[in-house]
Amino acid sequence: MKIKNTLCLHILMALLAILFLCVPPLVTSFDPPLTFQPLIKTMEGTPKDQKEKIATISHALQGNALFFLGASEVSTSEDEHYAVYNYFNKQLHQPVVAYGDSYVDNITQFLLLSRFKNDLNANSRIVLLFAPDSFYFDSIPPAIFADHFPSAIFNPLMADEKTRPFLVNYLHHINEEDISHLTFGEMNAYGWHPQVIWQEVNYEFANFCTMVKNDWLARLHIVPESPRPWPHPATKSIAPDWNQQLAQAQVLNQSRHESAATLWMDKSVFNDEKTPEEWYETPAVSRQMQAFQATIELLKARHAQFVVIVDPLNPWALKNTQKFRPIDSQIRAYLEQNQVRYFDMYAQPYQNGWNWDRLHPTELAWVAMDRFIAESFR
């Protein structure tokens, strides 16, 4: 009997210890303070991380920052001086929040903006960056889908009749073997499988443990959290000398060792036997164009201020880039029909050095985009 009482006492003490460790981080995660994040790659992370990202995007879209939405062009430019979220925040002192990573296609862009549609208003300032190859994506990899659509993003979208078909179509066409994890809400559409359920339980438990660990590390000042207050925009508008900025970008771009001999690509991604790659053999996906048009309709209906940029393609690194021309013509026609200001870099005479690989922008391309954005939102 004594041994049983001692065992129960130890179990009770262990439970109390767990509560002591877990309750404070859980409570502080319910309503974390607003932080400024100039670059958000995905919505993944602990519950606290997700709420911070959602609050940042929501606050930006309400008119408190320029919101830049793209794909891997955004995330691969962290070190670029002229990437919009670097140049505008640090040099022009105009707050910019950028979102984007690999495979953020037109459907993902539409779904993300739809999730925050109640924040869109006449003060919202948005730049949409469309990558030509995104119109050829039939779907995005399940692991990447999971990164962008946790429950806090997915569940409200499933309640929206305009966004639900895109999500259901995707979940009905993925292979179980490719899944990293799905939320329980996503399993309602995909199906309930023991392996997928176990993956999600493990994922959520790991996220919760990470949140508890990070909170206590910060409380004990072992890994202190640096403050990220929302910046105040400059009281006086700065008018850059764009010719000077372009000249500086050319100097910065020299480290890439681009030339005709490297198909105007960064030396680090070029090998001596490199030949131009074939552009997508498959036709464009109609759902991608539908999502593009739905995005424009959503922003127009909410009276948001927005502009569109279409990425350039490196014609030296890709064969048959003209295949995109009919889609590009549809894009421009739709934007002109809706009186949307745009900068179609694909349709411009290509500038050598605009892309460091097949389509990702360099400092030179970012200067061109920065100028267009600055002049559009004076």
Image (cartoon, rainbow, N blue to C red):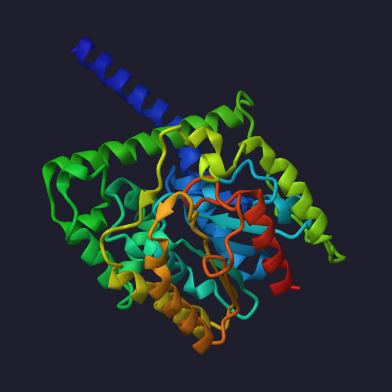
Residue 274 drawn above or below residue 217: below
Quadrant of the snapshot with the C terminus: bottom right
Residue 358 location (% of width, % of height): 46, 50
Confirm whether residue 222 shows in the render.
yes
Left/right of residue 176 with respect to residue 106 in the rendered view: left
Quadrant of the snapshot with the N terminus: top left
Q: How many numbered badges does the structure rendering display?
A: 0
Confirm whether residue 108 shows in the render.
no
Q: Residue 195 is drawn in which quadrant?
A: top left
**In the displayed image of the protein, which residue is found farthest to the top?**
3
Residue 293 location (% of width, % of height): 41, 78
Left/right of residue 75 with respect to residue 273 in the rendered view: right
Residue 258 drawn above or below residue 244: above
**In the displayed image of the protein, which residue is found farthest to the front?**
261
Q: Residue at x 59, y 65 (%)?
A: 349
The one nearer the camera, 228 or 308, is 308
Q: Residue at x 33, y 77 (%)?
A: 162
Q: Residue at x 46, y 61 (%)?
A: 131
**In the displayed image of the protein, which residue is found farthest to the right?**
236
Residue 289 location (% of width, % of height): 36, 74
Left/right of residue 317 with respect to residue 182 in the rendered view: right
Q: Residue at x 40, y 33 (%)?
A: 209
Residue 12 location (% of width, % of height): 32, 25
Residue 142 drawn above or below residue 371: above
